[in-house]
């Protein structure tokens, strides 16, 4: 499974001939740390998404690319009066092969940890071939 790079939008004035005025703040996305484990059944991806609720996670497969996107929200009521860190949004993409059973990918979220189980397709699973006496 290869990670796909997502092009970052260029900042106005950074090499552009005409600097454009920004009309709204751009959301920033961070790459969440991901562990990938492989066994005979397929792959298991474990992504840390602190502050993200299961309803704010979007996992999609499109054109052989698995994407994970999560939006974090404050769970406390009211506006902060002092802040030392910002809540962030997460985004990560991986290229997947046709050896993956896309229809049976499962996603579980618990305590800010996303676990994706990506099974192999039946034709990609290893199998034992019996040898017959000729």
Image (cartoon, rainbow, N blue to C red):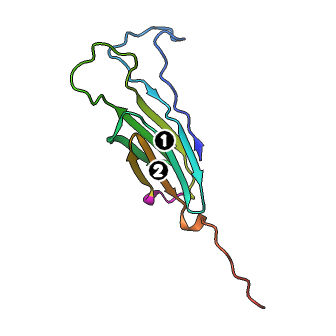
Q: Main secondary structure of the magenta part?
A: helix
Range shown magenta: 100-104
Which residue: 48% across, 9% down?
A: 13
User: Counting residues from the N terminus, which is met first, the one under dot 1 or under dot 2?
Assistant: 1
Q: In what element is the residue under mark 2?
A: strand
Task: Report the residue marked by disc 2.
Answer: 116
Left or right: where 115 falls relative to 129: left
Q: Residue furthest right?
A: 134
Residue 121, image x, y percentages: 54, 63
Residue 4, image x, y percentages: 56, 38
Residue at mark 1 to residue at mark 2: CA–CA distance:
8 Å
23 is higher (above) or lower (below) than 106: above
C-beta proximity under 8 Å, tags 1 and 2:
yes
Which residue: 21% across, 26% down?
A: 77
Residue 23, image x, y percentages: 32, 14
Which residue: 57% across, 40% down?
A: 3
Dot 1: few (<14), some (14–19), or many (≥20) neighbours within 10 Å? Answer: many
Left or right: where 39 falls relative to 119: right
Magenta region includes residue 2: no
Q: Name the residue nearer the viewer: 73 or 118.
A: 73
Task: Report the residue marked by disc 1.
Answer: 47
Which residue: 38% across, 23% down?
A: 27
Q: In what element is the residue under mark 1?
A: strand
Q: Name the residue nearer the viewer: 82 or 33.
A: 82
42 is higher (above) or lower (below) than 93: below
Left or right: where 134 falls relative to 52: right
Q: Name the residue nearer the viewer: 60 or 109.
A: 109
Label disc, if present, on residue 5 of the rendered structure: none
The C terminus appears in which quarter of the rendering? bottom right
């Amino acid at each position: 499974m290869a990670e796909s790079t997502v092009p970052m939008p260029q900042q106005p004035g950074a090499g552009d001939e005409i600097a454009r005025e920004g009309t709204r703040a751009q959301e920033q996305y961070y790459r969440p740390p991901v562990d990938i484990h492989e066994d005979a059944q397929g792959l298991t991806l474990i992504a840390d998404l602190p502050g993200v609720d299961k309803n704010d996670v979007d996992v999609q497969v499109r054109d052989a690319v698995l994407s994970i996107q999560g939006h974090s929200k404050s769970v406390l009521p009211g506006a902060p009066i002092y802040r030392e860190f910002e809540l962030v949004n997460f985004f990560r993409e991986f290229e997947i092969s046709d050896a993956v059973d896309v229809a049976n990918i499962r996603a579980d979220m618990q305590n800010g940890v996303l676990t994706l189980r990506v099974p192999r397709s039946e034709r990609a699973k290893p199998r034992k071939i019996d040898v017959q006496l000729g």
